[in-house]
Amino acid sequence: MKKLGYVITMLLVLCIVIGPFSQASAAFAEEKSKSSTEKAATVDLAPGARSAILLDAGTGTIIYEKNSHDKLPPASITKIMTMLLTVEALDEGRLQLTDKVRTSEYAASMGGSQIFLEPGEEMSVDEMLKGIAMASGNDASVAMAEKIAGSETSFVDMMNKRVEELGLKDTHFANCNGLPAENHYSSAHDIAVMSRELLKHERIIKYTGAYQDYLRKDSEKPFWLVNTNKLVRFYTGADGLKTGYTSEAKFCLSATAARDGLRAVAVVLGEPNTKTRNSEVSGMFDYLFSQYKVHTIHKVGDTMGTLAIEKGVKAQIPLTAKETYSILLKKGVAQEGIRHEVILPESVKAPVAEGQTVGKLVVYQGKVVMKEYDLKAGEAVAKAGWWKLFKRTAGSLFTAD
């Protein structure tokens, strides 16, 4: 009995001593596993960059970011906003591709990258866009700014106003071309948002996606354009957007590529050289295209419901998809439980403006909200006069149930 009591006592002692060590060992193993998972999920896709971001242009989903809100000199990536204001003017009819743009002495005096415009020389808007998008022409950028706003100063005011409209917090422009200037900065995040906005205007790809072209082709001094973004030639699916370099900013790039229904936007700032810049952006693209897929909820033109209009000239209007609504999914992840819901008010009071937000499209996986889209009215509906409302009310009184 004494021996049995001794054995039981020793076993109890061992449990007391070893227990904490086994728990600590298990906790260590769990922490090690967790650490490995986190490390894999946060792999640095752009180790050479001071700042970087990778997102899906369709949904705006951010895949990877590194110091993405740091305020840094953007060099010629500034021209993304210059091109955005130009294509917006074209789409709104304030500008035509055939319009002539006269070069001022000030525009012709720009140094750095240029298409060597001479004072008084005229080129079409189409040619100026080529010079900006492909050759990063500082002179062409200023000439275009003066054409749109009357002066570069007024155009820069437009640029900063557009920054505010896009809700960007890390950006302030002092010029339209990115030459070094005080109080001129942006971030990888903000540049990605501007790039995504620019890509909504499909005509821009004609310029940013071309590898080579000519200016003054039929003149005595033809100018051969070669795109400063070499990815448009060497990476399958790449078709933009803008390179940048100054000694202060180092090598920068906002790039886009499309493949398998996905469009990626990758921005790197402060890279040490062009080889590293292009290699890391290519790797970012590879990561998105190999790891993710798009799941479409509604395509352009799909009927999504009916919007009731209170006291309008129309009692209701159809609600159709004006863009493709989709979500980004990791490849290999089950799609079970993905559903969507169109949320509309019982009615909207007239007048209703075209493009007015009237509801939401909410995408769920299970009970988790994955994405929300604002739904906008596809047409304007004016307020009805009293006689129309009277006839509508009277008619309803005599309509059989």
Image (spheres, rainbow, N blue to C red):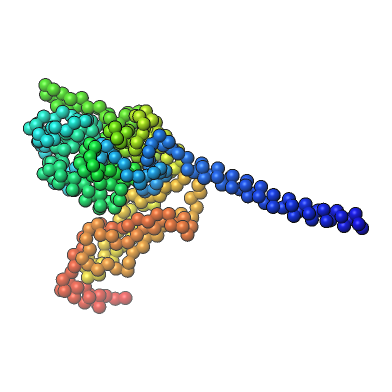
Question: Left or right of 307: which side holds 366?
Answer: right
List the single residue furthest toward the front: 182
Does residue 141 appear in this view?
yes
Quadrant of the image occupied by residue 134: top left
Residue 107 image offset from top left, x and y in percent? 13, 35
Q: Quadrant of the image for the C terminus?
A: bottom left
Residue 40 image offset from top left, x and y in percent? 51, 41
At horizontal 39% and vertical 58% (from top left) the residue drawn is: 362
At horizontal 51% and vertical 49% (from top left) the residue drawn is: 334
Does residue 243 appear in this view?
no
Number of numbered markers: 0
List the single residue furthest toward the left: 120
At horizontal 49% and vertical 55% (from top left) the residue drawn is: 337
Quadrant of the image occupied by residue 114: top left
Question: Left or right of 175: which side holds 25?
Answer: right
- In front of the other: 395 or 71: 71
Question: Is 375 above or below relative to 104?
Answer: below
Q: Quadrant of the image for the N terminus?
A: bottom right
- In front of the other: 117 or 55: 117
Residue 306 image offset from top left, x and y in percent? 31, 62
Question: Left or right of 294: which side holds 30?
Answer: right
At horizontal 83% and vertical 56% (from top left) the residue drawn is: 9
Question: Is 46 above or below relative to 389?
Answer: above
Residue 294 image offset from top left, x and y in percent? 41, 45
Question: Is 395 above or below relative to 314?
Answer: below
